[in-house]
């Protein structure tokens, strides 16, 4: 079966900064694929190159068999793109926004109502069809953006940090919708949140414009081969500084009010090092998280 997206040798610069650096990537059909990394990793630039908003310095992007930059009209009908910014018309109602974007995408009058009704029901926005888009909550705005992106039934859906600034309940509901979409289309989503990446079929970890690794969430976690020790201590910042100094080969990372230490050193020795520095702690071994895997991959 032909892949949903094939990216080959993709590069782009902003002045002297190489935002995307020679990326090769294949996304399979009917999977939710996550592109994960911190701010300035190059995620949004990669997304804009992939949908044809930016022209690459080098390389190509093929979406559902059509080259995004050489066969723009054909590719445009096969993809949907939802940017970070709310880009709908605030002074139009939910229905009017959907109708407008359906018309732009060439959806026939006969198909518009059926598709709109189905999408409104799936997202829970059916009771709000007459409400102005500017009066919707953050989560509802994102759902409306998703409907307008899906109304022409694209083969591949590109979403750039779709849950940024959305409340936790709406965030969970949005990801439930994405999970259901994989039965019909391919979804590619960028996010800085590694807990969201856990919901993806496969994940690309990105930093400084490059892909560090592409694998399933489980496969990425399995790359952390040393034990991961979770340290519960009253002063985590000081404890992390102590462990970083005493265990220079370890990976030491703050996780909220806990410290994660990835090292072959036994947990009792980790606790003893903290005790000698005046810290009372509890140390237990835990399973690696995606964040542990990411930190390991970006570590020098």
Image: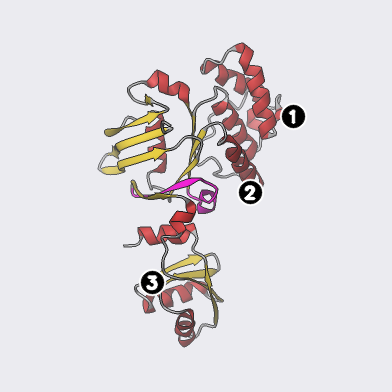
Estimate how packed mark 1 is, as few (under 14), some (14 to 19) or many (20 or more) residues with alpha carbons within 10 Å: few
What is the distance, in whole Å, between disc 1 and disc 2 at their CAs? 21 Å
Q: Secondary structure at mark 3?
A: loop
The percent coordinates of residue 122 (x first, y second) are: 67, 32
What is the distance, in whole Å, between disc 2 and disc 3 at their CAs? 33 Å
Front one among 100 and 159: 159
Closer to the chain start, of discs 2 and 3, is 2
Q: Which residue is mark 3?
A: 250
**Is residue 119 visible from the viewing direction of this image?**
yes
The C terminus lies in quadrant: bottom left
The N terminus lies in quadrant: top left
Estimate how packed mark 2 is, as few (under 14), some (14 to 19) or many (20 or more) residues with alpha carbons within 10 Å: few
Closer to the chain start, of discs 1 and 2, is 1
Residue sitting at the far right: 127
Rendered residue at 41%/19% (across/down): 74
What is the distance, in whole Å, between disc 1 and disc 3 at their CAs? 54 Å
The percent coordinates of residue 226 (x first, y second) are: 42, 69
Residue sitting at the far top: 109
Q: Which residue is mark 2?
A: 168
Question: Image height check: is 79 above or below 85?
Answer: above
- Say whether residue 61 is left or right of residue 80: left
């Amino acid at each position: 079966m032909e892949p949903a997206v094939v990216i080959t040798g993709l590069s782009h610069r902003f002045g002297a900064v190489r935002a995307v650096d020679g990326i090769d990537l294949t996304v399979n059909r009917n999977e939710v694929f996550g592109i994960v990394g911190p701010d300035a990793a190059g995620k949004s630039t990669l997304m804009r190159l992939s949908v044809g908003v930016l022209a690459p310095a080098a390389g190509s992007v093929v979406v559902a068999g059509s080259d995004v930059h050489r066969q723009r009209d054909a590719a445009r009908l096969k993809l949907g793109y939802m940017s970070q910014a709310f880009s709908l018309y605030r002074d139009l109602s939910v229905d009017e926004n959907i109708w407008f974007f359906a018309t732009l995408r060439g959806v026939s009058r006969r198909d518009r109502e059926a598709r709109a009704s189905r999408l409104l029901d799936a997202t829970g926005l059916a009771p709000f069809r007459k409400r102005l888009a500017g009066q919707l909550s953050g989560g509802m705005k994102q759902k409306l953006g998703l409907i307008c992106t899906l109304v022409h039934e694209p083969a591949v859906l590109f979403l750039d940090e779709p849950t940024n600034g959305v409340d936790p309940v709406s965030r969970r509901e949005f990801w439930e919708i994405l999970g259901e979409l994989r039965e019909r289309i391919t979804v590619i989503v960028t996010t800085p949140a590694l807990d969201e990446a856990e919901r993806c079929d496969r994940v690309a970890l990105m930093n400084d414009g490059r892909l560090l690794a592409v694998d399933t969430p489980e496969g990425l976690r399995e790359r952390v081969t040393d034990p991961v020790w979770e340290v519960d201590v009253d002063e985590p910042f000081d404890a992390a500084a102590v462990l970083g100094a005493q265990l220079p080969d370890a990976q030491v990372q703050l996780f909220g009010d806990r410290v994660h230490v990835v090292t072959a050193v036994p947990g009792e020795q980790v606790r003893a090092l903290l005790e000698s520095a005046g810290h009372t702690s509890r140390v237990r071994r835990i399973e690696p998280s995606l964040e542990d895997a990411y930190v390991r991959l970006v570590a020098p």
